[in-house]
Image (spheres, rainbow, N blue to C red):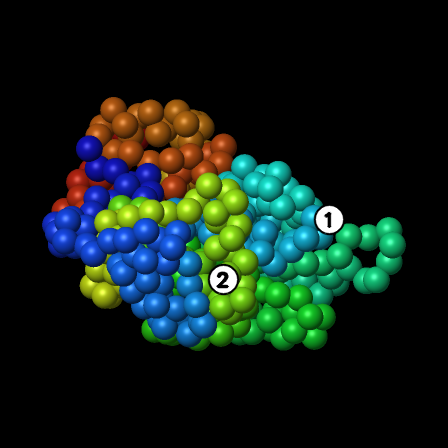
Amino acid sequence: MIDLRSDTVTKPTKEMRQAAFEAEVGDDVYGEDPSVNQLEALAAEKLGKEAALFVTSGTQGNQLAVLAHCKPSDEVIMEDNAHVFVYEGAAMSALAGIQPRTIKGERGAMNPEEVEAAIRPEDIHFPETGLICLENTHNKAGGTILPLENMKEIKDIAQKHQIPVHLDGARLFNASVATGIPVHEYAAYTDTVQFCLSKGLGAPVGSILAGPKEFIDRARKWRKRLGGGLRQAGMVAAPGIYALNHMIDRLAEDHYNAKVLAEGLGDISGIEVEGQVETNMVLLNVKNLGLTSEQFIQKLESQGVLAVPYGPYTIRFVTHNGISQEDVQTALSKIQQAI
């Protein structure tokens, strides 16, 4: 089975398993796990932030950011297909008591003028704007890269209005490898940032939330409140250390394979690749086949290829560690057979 559903299906490498086996551990709630402490310090250094916190998932990292930045009744500005809005179970409303305010973007990027217009003026009728959320790369837009200049303009607006900016950088290292821009330059235009170890970087579990030390102290307390206090977590932190030291540059292989997949799909009659492939995601439209995305995915599965629906007629393929060039060619053959 060729699994192109997500880069979350990666398996830890032999080296990661060995790192987990040999990890030094302690009680992280007491701050005594050496491997967790090393991972957090390494992540903070790479992002150019003062401190970092190891969390169980990207969703947890994003929600801790909202909880630590905002107070109940605040409003948070985000793109209308942002992961924090579409895929996190309305957690920011359920947990933080905030109201999302969405702006329709272009390939995941919000217009800075529209962001500024959405910031609430002082009025007893309105909520207060407590946070602006960005996403890079943008999942729902197909792994698109948020331009650095766009982030800078929004950050300048946020500073003018004294509003913090949080970056959902679940796949930020994909953006960095694709553009050659270091992650710390992207992070410089945010107050806080979350990135996933368990996607393209291939670690078995975990994400990082980074920002000022005072913010991380608040987020750590919120993590504990939500039952996220970790004990001998070095066994899952150690693979994360390996990922940050050894798995970043190889993301270029995933990007190459995604482009090869997109080019091959473009040569198949009756289907259409949506947008431009920038990182490790390919969006395929099957409307001209007279099939829904769900129906076509069933056909693919019978051919030994797994993908996910991304709309009524759109299917998402994601390349990742474990998907080889040979797998891409086989998948293209199987897709042709399904059609």
Q: Residues within 10 Å of mark 2 (few under 14, many from 20)?
A: many
Q: Which residue is mark 2?
A: 216
x 69%, y 70%: residue? 162
Q: Earlier in the sequence, mark 1 or mark 2?
A: 1
Residue bearing the label numbered 1: 73
**In front: 36, or 94?**
36
Write down the quadrant of residue 270 in the picture: top left
Q: Report if residue 122 is visible in the image.
A: yes
The residue nearer to you, when weighing 58 against 78, is 58
Q: Are circles 1 and 2 on residues that touch, CB within 8 Å?
A: no
Amino acid, disc 1: Ser
Task: Tell me what residue is drawn at x 37 percent, y 58 percent.
Answer: 31
Quadrant containing the C terminus is top left
> In what element is the residue under mark 2?
helix
Give the image location of residue 243, x and y in percent: 25, 59
The location of residue 115, given as percent across then percent down, is: 67, 62
**Residue nearest the viewer, comparing 134 with 72:** 72
Residue at 54% across, 63% down: 215
At 45% from the left and 72% from the top, the residue drawn is 50
Packing grade of label 1 (10 A; few <14, some 14-19, many >=20) is some
Q: Position of residue 188 (x, y in %)?
A: 49, 74
Question: Is disc 1 placed on a helix, strand or loop?
Answer: loop
Q: Quadrant of the N terminus?
A: top left
Q: At which x and y percent is residue 67? A: 59, 51
Label 1 – label 2 distance at C-alpha:
22 Å
Question: Could one spot residue 136 in this view of the protein?
Answer: no
